[in-house]
Image (tube, rainbow, N blue to C red):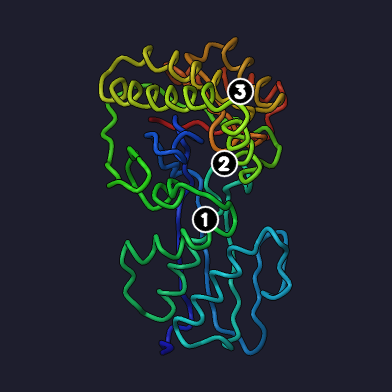
């Protein structure tokens, strides 16, 4: 089933959950945005021997990859089996500027790029449903109970209105302004964060269910604001969402510090994004001047990196 090219290429971008993380797992709506300035690229080449995975920091045989790579390892094995090529020697090279473990969809983007690279190498058609099947297969191994929002968003060029197990809707945003992402430098803990919320539901069922429902309400409010030009209406929604996420136990002192710094620097609103317990936060800026000031302030308060992009 091999072609003569002997090279397969796949690409995906990062994602950012604007509002609705964690509550989306329980059927509430969420809004997610593609982050096109952060990319994942994978090149697959046939070699003479071995099955090698490499990026700028590591080079290793597939069977010796570390545990946090297990979802991708299992995905590669499944793709090799699909194309009747379990023994094929290959080199899979990863080129990415998406920070891993920060809630920006790096694992879903990698699974997407890997899947596209294999289908490209074998010159096979890849439907959207089949792509999402392979990506969600990998994500379930990595994160456990996942909503599917990461897989959908890293494969979308438009913002998404997402409700688990329902038809995903593209969202047309008319809102001006910019978003500033600040990286805490701390590896987020998705499965632990999901478990934290699940434990909250067990211990404080009524209060936690109310908080999850409120997050869903905030997502609905944010949707209305995003389709208008009332940028100042979004800030309080982001701040209120962060307060609930903190109450659910998924924030982190470093994130709280960056969020507070962003607000004092003029952000209209700020919150963590992704699973929490580390990872990144996002702040809303009214204009480019504010965005630059917020970015510089975050760097002064310990952000490992910052990125600015438009809504």
Category of crowding for the residue at label 3, using alpha-carbon neighbours closer than 10 angstroms: few (below 14), some (14–19), many (at least 20):
some
Q: Is residue 276 left or right of residue 4?
A: right
- Which of 301/205 is in front? 205
Q: Contact, CB < 8 Å: mark 3 with mark 1?
A: no
Disc 2 to disc 3, C-alpha distance: 16 Å
Quadrant (top left, top right, bottom left, bottom right) of the N terminus: bottom left
Say which residue label 3 marks. 246
Q: Nearer the viewer, mark 2 or mark 3?
A: 3
Q: Quadrant of residue 45?
A: bottom right
Q: Residues within 10 Å of mark 1 (few under 14, many from 20)?
A: many
- Nearest to N terminus: mark 2 or mark 3: 2
The residue depicted at 51 percent of the width and 80 percent of the height is 80
| Left or right: 63 as drawn, with respect to 38 | right
Separation of residues labelled 2 and 1 (CA atoms): 14 Å
What is the distance, in whole Å, between disc 3 and disc 1 at their CAs? 30 Å
Question: Regarding mark 2 in the picture, which secondary structure is present there?
Answer: loop
Residue on which disc 1 sits: 40
Dots 2, 1 in contact, CB < 8 A: no
Q: Secondary structure at mark 3?
A: helix
- Say if mark 2 contacts mark 3, CB within 8 Å: no
| Vertical position of residue 173 compared to residue 86: above or below | above
Which of disc 1 and disc 2 is earlier in sequence? 1
Towards the viewer: 196 or 75: 196
Image vertical order of residue 225 relative to residue 94, above or below: above
Residue 8 relative to residue 307: left or right: left
- Circle nearer the viewer, 3 or 1: 3
The residue identified by callout 2 is 103
Nearest to the observer: residue 256 or residue 288: 256
- Please provide percent x and percent y for residue 184: 67, 32
Residue 170 pos. (x, y %): 27, 41
Callout 2: 10 Å neighbours few (<14), some, many (20+)?
many
């Amino acid at each position: 089933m091999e072609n003569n090219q002997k090279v397969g290429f796949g690409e995906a971008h990062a994602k950012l959950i604007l509002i609705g993380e964690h509550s989306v797992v329980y059927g509430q709506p969420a809004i997610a945005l593609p982050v096109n300035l952060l990319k994942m690229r994978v090149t697959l080449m046939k070699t003479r021997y071995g099955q090698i995975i490499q990026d700028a920091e590591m080079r290793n045989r597939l069977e010796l990859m570390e545990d946090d790579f297990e979802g991708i390892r299992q995905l590669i094995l499944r793709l090799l089996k699909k194309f009747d090529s379990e023994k094929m020697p290959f080199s899979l090279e990863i080129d990415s500027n998406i920070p891993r473990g920060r809630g920006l969809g790096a694992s879903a983007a990698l699974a997407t790029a890997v899947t596209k690279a294999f289908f490209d190498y074998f010159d096979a058609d890849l439907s959207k449903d089949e792509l999402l099947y392979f990506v969600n297969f990998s994500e379930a191994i990595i994160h456990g109970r996942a909503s599917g929002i990461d897989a959908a968003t890293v494969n979308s060029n438009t913002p998404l209105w997402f409700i688990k197990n329902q038809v995903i809707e593209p969202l047309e945003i008319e809102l001006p302004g910019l978003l500033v992402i600040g990286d805490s430098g701390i590896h987020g803990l998705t499965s632990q964060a999901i478990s934290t919320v699940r434990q909250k539901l067990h211990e404080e069922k009524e209060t936690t269910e109310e908080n999850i429902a409120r997050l869903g309400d905030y997502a609905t409010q944010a949707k209305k604001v995003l389709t208008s030009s009332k940028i100042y209406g979004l800030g309080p929604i982001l701040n209120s969402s962060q307060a609930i996420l903190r109450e659910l136990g998924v924030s982190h002192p470093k994130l709280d510090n960056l969020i507070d710094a962003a607000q004092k620097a003029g952000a209209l609103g700020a919150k963590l994004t992704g699973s929490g317990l580390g990872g990144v936060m996002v702040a809303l800026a009214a204009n480019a001047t504010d965005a630059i000031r917020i970015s510089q302030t975050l760097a002064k308060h310990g952000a490992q990196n910052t990125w600015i992009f438009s809504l």
